[in-house]
Amino acid sequence: MLNSGEKVFDLGREARTALTPDKLQNLMLGLHQQARAGFQFLFESIRVPEDATQRRADPTLLNRFADFMNTPETLTLLRTITNVPAIAFADAQATAYGPGHFLTTHDDNVAGKNRFAAYVMNLTPAWTPDWGGLLQFLDGDRHVAQAWTPRFNALNLFAVPQPHAVTLVAPSRRRDESRSQDGCAAFNCFFFAFIPPNLRRH
């Protein structure tokens, strides 16, 4: 998944594989150049249906996890932790960052979405800060106030809006053959924005 201004494009693995090395290199260079002066991202993504009926019809692990996050018990716990009683729904997608992937500074505050908080569930073991892929938070002077290294089985919660970014994953980070057969993901996560039911997308 990548963007060009406000337009979002899904470039699947088959489409990327079909690109010649030169075209792929030019694409990466162009995205990195655009990231110098504006909002830009590049990562792999799987969207999870918001409709619980659709999730139950296709009970993948991702869909089951989204169902768990939307149980009354889980939502009650999240309201308690965040001190936001209005939380009523967990939106979800799974993402994976490979070499050269990144997410520039943004605050998740999208008009009409009424997002209160976000979280990342980290799934890749044994990550090191030297590989990049850090979730970093900026202060009012745009200095890095905190940076969190992906840690296996750790749930990261943070308020929305809040300026944050995911740092560039080092090109030296390659696929771990013992763990992955189809890519060189930096870390996998679930991303959730909490949205009241009356404001869900249709």
Image (tube, helix red, strand yellow):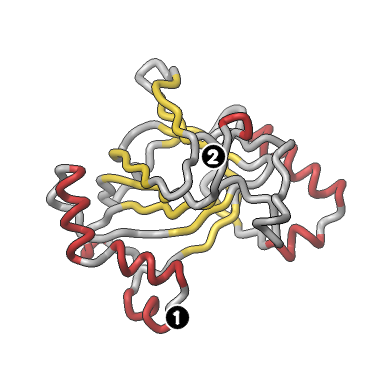
How far, Cα to Cα, is label 1 from label 2?
Answer: 29 Å
Of callouts 1 and 2, which one flags the residue occurring earlier in the amino acid sequence?
1
Identify the residue shown where x is 47% and y is 47%.
152
Of residues 193 and 148, the one drawn nearer to the viewer in this rendering: 148
- Residue type at the position of mark 1: Asp
Query: Is residue 4 visible in this depiction of the protein?
Result: no
Q: Residue 118 appears at what percent x and percent y?
A: 33, 46
Q: Residue 108 appears at what percent x and percent y?
A: 38, 43
72 shown above or below 5: below
Q: Quadrant of residue 56?
A: bottom left
Of residues 49 and 65, the one drawn nearer to the viewer in this rendering: 65
Q: Are marks 1 and 2 in contact (CB under 8 Å)?
A: no
Q: Quadrant of residue 68?
A: bottom left
**Quadrant showing the N terminus:** bottom right
Q: Residue 151 appears at what percent x and percent y?
A: 47, 42
* Neighbours of disc 1 within 10 Å: few (<14), some (14-19), many (20+): few
Query: Is residue 23 visible in this depiction of the protein?
Result: yes
* Neighbours of disc 2 within 10 Å: few (<14), some (14-19), many (20+): many
- Residue type at the position of mark 2: Leu
Answer left or right for 32 relative to 39.
Answer: right
- Can you tell which mark lies on residue 87? none
Secondary structure, mark 1, is loop
Identify the residue shown where x is 22% and y is 64%.
197
Identify the residue shown where x is 68% and y is 32%.
33
Location of mark 2 (residue): 103
Location of mark 1 (residue): 58
